[in-house]
Amino acid sequence: MTRPLLEVEINGKRFNAVLDTGSRRSYIRADLAKDFPSAPVEPFEVRLGGRRLTLKEGKLVSGIVKDSEGRGYRFSQILFPVEDSGEENGKRIDILFGAIALEDWGTVIDESYKPPKIDHRLLRKGELVELVGGATR
């Protein structure tokens, strides 16, 4: 099974992100994370892409995540910088959103559609601002 790939916008730039229900935490490529504010975290170990990593820093990242209908929602999340997040469907992964973020957003992934249909249910219900055509509602 391939993981759903979607577009994320941060500071006016577009990035590839995957939704990974098998990962607890969320990650961002280290080269993209350097300009974001640090978030204090207790160091922890994780296995990612077959490698064992010790992560000592989180980054507070805010941006816009889209659903499969193209609607965008603001998010702020602590992402953990990693050197390489791999590829999905031939595209370099910039951000990997794990289960905690997906649960916070109320994300539902309907795999009966190809590609899977994605709905950020809680974001859509107004916990964060839905953006339409660049203007907030």
Image (tube, helix red, strand yellow):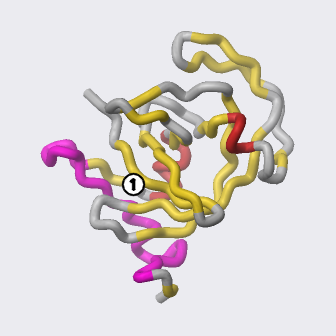
Label 1 neighbourhood size at 10 Å, few (<14), some (14-19), many (20+)?
some
Left or right: where 32 falls relative to 47: right
User: Could you tell me residue 44's position as x and y percent?
Assistant: 75, 24
- The residue at the point 29 percent across, 59 percent down is 68
User: Could you tell me residue 63's position as x and y percent?
Assistant: 60, 62
Q: Quadrant of the N terminus?
A: top left
Is residue 107 within the magenta segment?
Answer: no
**Tag 1's secondary structure?**
strand
Q: Nearer the viewer, residue 58 or 89?
A: 89
Amino acid identity at mark 1: Thr
Is residue 124 within the magenta segment?
Answer: yes
Residues shaded magenta? 110-133
- The residue at the point 57 percent across, 20 percent down is 48
User: Could you tell me residue 58's position as x and y percent?
Assistant: 76, 41
- The residue at the point 37 percent across, 64 percent down is 121
Query: Residue under circle 1?
Result: 107
